[in-house]
Every structure is written in structure tokens, then in C-alpha cells.
Image (cartoon, helix red, strand yellow):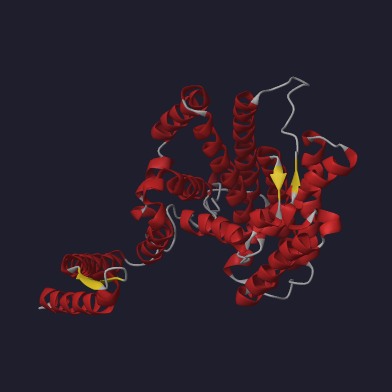
């Protein structure tokens, strides 16, 4: 009976779609010959397509719901196939070795265009891991992350334009400037959370972009700043291909450094404070965690990575303008964190490659790219709201040592 009801509902939906799309997909008016062309085959395709999609959708929704009922809450770790594979030492060593070999050989086996795309994907890996500190670990919804990315990029561009400062000197300065802006944003939003925090950070991002766009004496306005030099390599002159490969390996080093730092942060005192802040802000404060320090540190460190990638972006494109730092950029980085799994390092890396490489390799479907992107996001939010790889809740156990404390001791 349930299947019959689903079948009936799918038929109704198919008829609705045929009715709604009828004027657009069926009727075609030839204004030159003043004739009407009836494209009935389109109505047939719409009806069949919407019926099949609706039925398949209902089937998977029902399957996901029954799966949740059978397994119950708290067994997400058992269901995560990717996480089980990642935790298998034999497989992870082999996968790391294979990834390292492919990463080293890639720029020598592919074109400059492919290397350039991969460099961009690696930049988004670092940006995603940086925002993961703020959103994934500290639980602070941030919609203006592109502003700090812009701060880093314009720091390098302006320092080079006015003082002739190179990439390696501008890199820490860009990170420092982004960190200062992160602290400036962090102070006013200390008391905010949830939607209110998201609105303020969104406003900060838009204000930054508008300032860069309208303060022409400072930032050259919409025209931007051009002829920014690429990273130097001990004073050697590099052609475009060599500079692209060099930047690719530089980005691999940045990714490894970011993974190392973020993993160390997760296991540190401040990392545990961020987790407590994310789970319950009131309980976190009641347990003696310095909430102000935790929030400010999250904003400062998250902004630092955005600032560094801003400098790399300016060096990669040799040109910056405000159009590169719109809200869409912040939304893309936030999507990477949400899709990968809040707080999950491996998940963010996989999501970065998926979201950045997929639009590039689906140029054949360029007219439908945003539709595909939106569909994937909706499907993920319904079937895996925890992301590609779920971040496992950390547990700490206390083991009582009977030998040192006597046989009469009891475990705590």
C-alpha cells in the first residue's frame, strides 16, 4: 500500500511538472514566420523524468528514514565507510604513499592548465581548513570569510605597489593584517551567536568589499591592482610554466603545514575549549572555559590562513580587484566546510577537491553547473547532513592503575 501511495503521488507530481512547464518547453513561437511549433516530445520527457526522479527520491528518503530507526542515534561512526577506511592503518599508509607519488608526478604529466586548476583547489583546501577552525571547531557561523582573503591579497598588492615588497616578505604581513582584522571583528561579536553572528559577519564581508570598490585612491577601485609579481625562487627567473609548477609545490607545502597545525590545535587545550564552545556555550562558560579567549583565538587563527591564501592568490593571478571577494566566495568556502563535515580535516579536503574541480571538469554542462551544484548540496543535506566524513566526538577515559594504588582500589 505504501508503494502504491508513493506511485500515485509521483504521477501527480509528474502531471504538475508537465502543466507548469507547458508554456516554456512545449510552445515555441516563430515570430518571423508567425507560426507556433508544438514540441510535444518535451512534455513527454518532462513527465517521465519528473515521475522517475520523484519515485527514486521517495524510495531513498524512506530507506534513509528506516535506516535511522534501525540503527538509532550515536552510531554514525559505524555507518561512515570512508572514516573506517581512513582509520585503517594499512590502507591509510598505502593511500598516503599513492597520493604523494601522484602529487609529485602530476605537474610533470599534465598541462599547465591542469596544474593551475589543481593549485586553485589546493588553495581552497587551506581556506576550508582555516574556516573549519571558526565554523567546524568553534561553532561560530561566519559568512564574511572572503573579507580576510581580500585583506591578505590587497596587503601584498599595496605593499608591492608602494614599497616594492616581495612575496616572501608580504606573506607573514598579509597573515598578520588578516589576524588583526579578525580580532577587530571578534570584539564586537563576542556576545552574538547563531543567525545574529552570521548577519554581522556577512555585513563585515560586504563592507570590506564596498570599501575596496569605492575608495579608489587607496585600492584603485574596481580597476584593481595589476602586475603583482609571482613568488621568487632564490632570485631565479622563471617562465610561466615553471612559475606555475613552483606555485603548485608551494601550495602542497602550505596544505601539509595547515593540516599539521590544525591537527595539533584540535588536540590542544584551546582545541578542546573550541569544542566545548561549539557544543554548549553556557555549559562551556560554567565549566570555567574562557569564552572570550576561545572566540578571539578562533577568529584570529581562522583569519590568518585566509590572509596567507590572499597573498598567494594575488601572486598567482598577478591581479586583484574587489570582484574576486564577493559573498559567493565566502559561501563557496562555507559550503566546503559543511559538505566535508564540520570539524573534519579529511572531509574538508575531499569537499574542496569536489567543489572546485567538479565545475572545471563539467564545462560540457556549463549551463547547468549551478543546478548540479545546488542538487548535490540538497541531496547531501538530506541524506548526509553531517557531511562526507563525520567528525567523531572525542572521548577521554581514565584508567585506574591497580599495581601502583593497591589491589583494593576500584576503577574510576
In percent of the image, x 62 and y 55: which residue is there?
A: 131
Residue that protrudes farthest toward the front in the picture: 33
Q: Position of residue 5 (x, y in %)?
A: 14, 79
In percent of the image, x 69 and y 41: which residue is there?
A: 312
Left or right, 402 with respect to 147, comes to: left
In percent of the image, x 74 and y 67: which residue is there?
A: 207
Asked where in the image residue 45 lies, by quadrant, the reply is bottom left
Number of numbered discs visible in the structure rendering: 0
Left or right, 126 with respect to 386, comes to: right
Can residue 60 be seen? yes
Can residue 384 be seen? no
Q: Position of residue 322 (x, y in %)?
A: 70, 56
Q: Position of residue 209 (x, y in %)?
A: 72, 62
Q: Is residue 200 above or below residue 394?
A: below
Q: Position of residue 188 (x, y in %)?
A: 78, 72
Q: Is residue 172 above or below residue 218?
A: above
Image quarter where the C terminus lies is bottom right
Image quarter where the N terminus lies is bottom left
Left or right, 58 with respect to 254, comes to: left
Amino acid at each position: 500500500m505504501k508503494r502504491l501511495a508513493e506511485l500515485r503521488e509521483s504521477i501527480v507530481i509528474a502531471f504538475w511538472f508537465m502543466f507548469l512547464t507547458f508554456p516554456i518547453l512545449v510552445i515555441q513561437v516563430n515570430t518571423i514566420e508567425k507560426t507556433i511549433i508544438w514540441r510535444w516530445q518535451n512534455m513527454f520527457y518532462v513527465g517521465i523524468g519528473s515521475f522517475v526522479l520523484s519515485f527514486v527520491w521517495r524510495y531513498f528518503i524512506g530507506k534513509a528514514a528506516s535506516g535511522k530507526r534501525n540503527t538509532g542515534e550515536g552510531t554514525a561512526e559505524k555507518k561512515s565507510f570512508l572514516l573506517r577506511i581512513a582509520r585503517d592503518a594499512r590502507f591509510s599508509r598505502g593511500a598516503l604513499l599513492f597520493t604523494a607519488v601522484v602529487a609529485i608526478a602530476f605537474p610533470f604529466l599534465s598541462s599547465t592548465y591542469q596544474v593551475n586548476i589543481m593549485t586553485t583547489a589546493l588553495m581552497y583546501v587551506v581556506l576550508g581548513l582555516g574556516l573549519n577552525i571558526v565554523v567546524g571547531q568553534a561553532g561560530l557561523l561566519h559568512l564574511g570569510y572572503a573579507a580576510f582573503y581580500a585583506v591578505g591579497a590587497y596587503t601584498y598588492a599595496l605593499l608591492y605597489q608602494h614599497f616594492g615588497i616581495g612575496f616572501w616578505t608580504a606573506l607573514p604581513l598579509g597573515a598578520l593584517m588578516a589576524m588583526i582584522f579578525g580580532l577587530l571583528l571578534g570584539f564586537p561579536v563576542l556576545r552574538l551567536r547563531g543567525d545574529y553572528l552570521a548577519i554581522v559577519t556577512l555585513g563585515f564581508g560586504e563592507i570590506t568589499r564596498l570599501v575596496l570598490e569605492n575608495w579608489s585612491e587607496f585600492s584603485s577601485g574596481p580597476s584593481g591592482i595589476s602586475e603583482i609579481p609571482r613568488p621568487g625562487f632564490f632570485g631565479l627567473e622563471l617562465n610561466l610554466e615553471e612559475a606555475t609548477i613552483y606555485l603548485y609545490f608551494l601550495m602542497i607545502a602550505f596544505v601539509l603545514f595547515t593540516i599539521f597545525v590544525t591537527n595539533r590545535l584540535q588536540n590542544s587545550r584551546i582545541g578542546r575549549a573550541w569544542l566545548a564552545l561549539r557544543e554548549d556555550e553556557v555549559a562551556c562558560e560554567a565549566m570555567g572555559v574562557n569564552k572570550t579567549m576561545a572566540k578571539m583565538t578562533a577568529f584570529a587563527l581562522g583569519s590568518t590562513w585566509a590572509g596567507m591564501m590572499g597573498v598567494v592568490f594575488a601572486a598567482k593571478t598577478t591581479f586583484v580587484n574587489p570582484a574576486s571577494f564577493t559573498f559567493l566566495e565566502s559561501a563557496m568556502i562555507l559550503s566546503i566546510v559543511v559538505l566535508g563535515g564540520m570539524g573534519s580535516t579529511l572531509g574538508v579536503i575531499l569537499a574542496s577537491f569536489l567543489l572546485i574541480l567538479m565545475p572545471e571538469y563539467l564545462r560540457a554542462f556549463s549551463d547547468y553547473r549551478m543546478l548540479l551544484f545546488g542538487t548535490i548540496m540538497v541531496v547531501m543535506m538530506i541524506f548526509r547532513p553531517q557531511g562526507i566524513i563525520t567528525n567523531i566526538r572525542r572521548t577521554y577515559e581514565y584508567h585506574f592503575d591497580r599495581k601502583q594504588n593497591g589491589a583494593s582500589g576500584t576503577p574510576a
